[in-house]
Image (cartoon, rainbow, N blue to C red):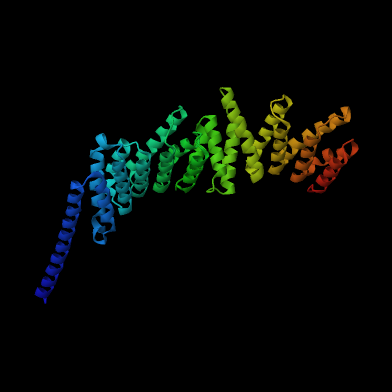
């Protein structure tokens, strides 16, 4: 019985060895034909091998053989159309074959060749083969960061290659790519690339929210604003997570001291945008920040540094907070408006109406006297009606 098992095992091993030997002979045959063929025929040999079902198991090695030829002849044939066609076929094939042994060769070709289509094919293969490979991911991160710097300096970059790099990083899905992709987001690329970058940032696993928080806390004002916008536009965050980002952004915009006009403009934009987001989200945890924003905007409006619309937005933000502190700030402001109206007859209708509606939204009974006093003054009918409605909404 034991002798029979040994004979069967030996026969199986012999068959397997024979099959492997046969495959190696076929591979060697394709490699020999490839080496002897002219440049145009080399690509045809790869395509013929890809169509050969018996060649499936060694196609990765054959593509690597071809890629080595492409790399070794870069100095003299880099711009030859037939060489570029061969490079594209071999790169695409290496990716489809899952041959990770070609990673270094692919990157070296990418670094040595400047043809756009060839580089796009290589990046597609790297995105498939490089998952979990820290060196590949680092190479692509560094490449994208470098292109971002060049573009900012006014140098023309290859848009298709940038797009392919972004797609490869999205496919690789490593959170170490957040900085490079965020840098691309702030580089003023064409809209199509910005959308691709935003999509990649949404797809890559990892704590993207914390990354954005760190940028808002530590980076220059323009990048704080970009990080806030990225968070608000991201589909991966819940309303509560957006609220947290908006609160941090508002706090930073109120607490930062700009060094120049550009930084001041970015911080102002961040303040107004985050206050709007807090209003929409009704993020009541930001109540203290909303009150600070209200008084800052009030001062800016009074000094002609902010338009009426911004002050009305700040009023609405307090109305969304629903707190007694917010109500008191609004009520005191309405008291000042009432006093001025009684004394001079001059008031801003839009601001007055916004104050009334915000107080009604909160419903704090402390606003009763200020709202009631409107009925004794010469406000138009629609403000009188809004005040009555607000009075009816007060909670006792």
Measured along the vertical axis of the image, is residue 51 above or below residue 242?
A: below
Q: Residue 91 location, x and y as percent?
A: 31, 47
Q: Is residue 374 visible?
A: yes
Q: To which quarter of the image does residue 376 belong? A: top right
| Residue 292 quadrant | top right
Which residue is pictured at 30% across the width and 50% down the height? 94
Q: Residue at x 56, y 39 (%)?
A: 229
**Eyeballing the image, is 149 above or below 178?**
above
Q: Residue furthest left?
A: 3
Q: Nearer the viewer, residue 152 or 135?
A: 152
Q: Nearer the viewer, residue 242 or 334?
A: 242
**Residue 334: quadrant of the picture:** top right
Residue 46 appears at what percent x and percent y? Answer: 26, 51
Residue extending farthest to the bottom is 1
* Residue situated in front as seen by the camera: 26 or 58: 26
In the image, is 378 to the left or to the right of 301? right
């Amino acid at each position: 019985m034991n002798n029979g098992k040994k004979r069967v095992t030996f026969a199986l091993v012999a068959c397997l060895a024979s099959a492997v030997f046969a495959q190696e002979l076929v591979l060697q045959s394709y490699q020999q034909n490839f080496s002897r063929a002219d440049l145009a025929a080399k690509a045809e040999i790869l395509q013929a091998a890809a169509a050969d079902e018996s060649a499936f198991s060694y196609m990765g090695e054959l593509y690597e053989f071809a890629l080595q030829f492409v790399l070794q002849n870069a100095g003299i044939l880099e711009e030859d159309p037939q060489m570029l066609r061969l490079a594209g076929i071999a790169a695409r094939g290496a990716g489809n074959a899952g041959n990770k042994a070609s990673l270094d060769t692919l990157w070296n070709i990418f670094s040595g060749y400047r043809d756009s289509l060839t580089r796009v094919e290589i990046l597609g293969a790297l995105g498939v083969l490089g998952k979990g490979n820290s060196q590949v991911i680092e190479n692509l991160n560094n490449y994208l960061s470098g292109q971002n710097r060049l573009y900012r300096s006014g140098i023309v970059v290859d848009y298709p290659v940038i797009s392919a790099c972004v797609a490869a990083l999205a496919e690789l899905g490593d959170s170490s790519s957040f900085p490079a992709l965020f840098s691309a987001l702030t580089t003023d690329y064409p809209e199509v690339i910005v959308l691709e970058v935003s999509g990649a940032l949404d797809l890559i696993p990892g704590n993207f929210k914390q990354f954005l928080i760190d940028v808002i806390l530590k980076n220059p004002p323009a990048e704080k604003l970009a990080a806030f916008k990225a968070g608000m536009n991201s589909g991966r965050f819940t309303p509560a997570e957006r609220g947290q980002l908006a609160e941090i952004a508002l706090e930073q915009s109120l607490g930062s001291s700009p060094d120049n006009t550009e930084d001041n403009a970015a911080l102002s934009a961040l303040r107004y945008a985050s206050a709007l987001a807090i209003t929409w989200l009704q993020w009541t945890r930001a109540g203290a920040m909303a009150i600070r924003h209200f008084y800052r905007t009030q001062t800016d409006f009074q000094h002609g540094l902010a338009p009426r619309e911004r002050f009305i937005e700040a009023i609405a933000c307090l109305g969304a907070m629903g707190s007694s502190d917010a109500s008191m700030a609004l009520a005191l402001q309405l008291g000042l408006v009432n006093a001025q109206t009684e004394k001079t007859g001059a008031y801003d209708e839009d601001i007055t109406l916004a104050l009334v509606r915000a107080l009604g939204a909160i419903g704090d009974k402390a606003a009763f006297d200020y709202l009631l006093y409107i009925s004794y003054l010469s406000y138009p009918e629609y403000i009188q009606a809004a005040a009555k409605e607000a009075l009816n909404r007060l909670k006792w």
